[in-house]
Image (cartoon, coloured by chain):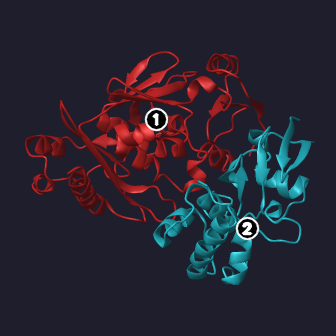
Amino acid sequence: MPTVSMTVNGKQVSGEVDARKLLVEFLRENLLLTGTHVGCDTSQCGACVVHVDGRSVKSCTMLAVMADGASVTTIEGMASGETMHPMQEAFREQHGLQCGFCTPGMVMSAVDLVAVNPDPSEAEIRHWLGGNICRCTGYHNIVEAVRDGAARMRALGKAAAE
Amino acid sequence: MYAFEYHRPGSVADAGALLKANEDAKIIAGGMTMIPTLKQRLAMPGELVDLRDCADLKGITVSGGTVTIGAMTKHDTVASSAEVKGAIPALAGLAGNIGDPAVRNRGTLGGSIANNDPAADYPSACLALGATIVTTNREIAAEDFFTGLFETALEEGEIITAVRFPVPEKAAYKKFDQPASRYALVGVFVAKTAGGVRVGVTGAGQDGVFRQTDMEAALSANFAPEAIDGVMVSPDRLNVDIHGDAAYRANLIKVMAKRAVADCA
């Protein structure tokens, strides 16, 4: 079996995996990082979004071996100790979640958006989140949360382009 | 997924050698179609050859009226490229509307055209712009490359290395996308070049992407949206599915083409 090594949430990890193991399975089953969810398993819903080398990808549609050597960030890697990431804080403050199943993917996608577009408009947020589906259909507050999160990230100097 | 062996060659030459040595090997580029295909067991390659380390397949160059894009260049890279935006903004715009951001961060130009999904976006740009597909063996005109539903002129072991897009005078791409998959229900790429107008249509044809030559003739005579009014688009050989019947798609071809021409103004 191939061996994979990658940095996950700042920690070096490695393991033997079947070549057909998905990145999301490696994260959830090998590393027990179950914050990354599997919704549709067909790359449509976005519950499995993580960052690979800083950009959002659907971890249900990437093999673990394809992330060999990469730096991966999951929802578990967003907070600093007890302090939530500003985007997580915004989702909490703005009630940007109901059942919470889609939230990890929403937060990871939103942070990637702010990295490329520090002050996105409502239309830009809605377009960007086209690949993240909320089955509670709580999109209104999710969009509010992303706007708020972007503002918080700008204030903390965490957005791109500064 | 059935089990397979995974290979990660460092160059396109090594990738070619692996394909030659393993009869049931398949290439994986971004994996946006290959991985779902493997999950559904629609393909069962014994070997998977990942092109991600083939640096010779990446990158964008613009020179002498041609935009050359490496086969492993991701959609997001094309969409955000200042060179592509400057030379063929419609192509950058097309890439920026494929799937969703996470898909664009993985999916590649070469993967899209090698798969030739009948609803993929890039094939329409290749046809309308008169692109040349460069492979490990030869150069293929887009016209001759897309041969049918999920079929191309690629031979066993042949790898796409780059696509050369001639810079048009004007071009625009408009798609009516299916909101869940974001594939084109109908997408129309219109390009006005020194040699006339070319119209590439995706999402609509039963045989995949095609040129709408009646519209090309009408637009070559009068490059205005109203020139399309008089063109009859036949529903024969158009796709029928739960999202739209052939007559609906025939109408959408006209609507999207008019919007694209209007966008060129």
Residue at disc 1, secondary structure: strand
**Quarter containing the C terminus of chain A:** bottom right
Residue A98, can we see it? no
Query: Relative to B229, is A24 on the left or the right?
Result: right
Residue at disc 2, secondary structure: helix
Residue placed most toward the observer, B22 or A54: A54
Tell me which residue sits at (49%, 72%) in the image: A122
Q: Which chain is cyan?
A: A
Residue placed most toward the observer, B259 or A19: B259
Work out whether A20 lies above or below A43: above
Label of residue B168 in the image = none
**Quarter containing the N terminus of chain A:** top right
Find residue B124 and report its image quarter: top left
Q: Position of residue A148 (x, y in %)?
A: 62, 75
Colour seen for chain B: red
Q: Could you confirm whether marks 2 and 1 are on the same chain?
A: no
Query: Relative to B215, is A84 on the left or the right?
Result: right
Q: Amino acid at mark 2?
A: Pro
Dot 1 alpha-carbon crowd within 10 angstroms: few under 14, some 14 to 19, many 20 or more: some
Q: Residue beneath label 2, please?
A: A104
Q: Position of residue B105 (x, y in %)?
A: 60, 47
Residue A143, can we see it? yes
Tell me which residue sits at (51%, 69%) in the image: A126
Q: Amino acid at mark 1?
A: Glu
Q: Residue beneath label 1, please?
A: B151
Q: Position of residue A89 (x, y in %)?
A: 74, 75
Q: Position of residue A142 (x, y in %)?
A: 61, 77
Find residue B68 and report its image quarter: top left
Work out whether B52 lies above or below A72: above
Q: Chain of mark 1?
A: B
Q: Chain of mark 2?
A: A
Query: Which marked residue is nearer to the observer: mark 2 or mark 1?
Result: 2
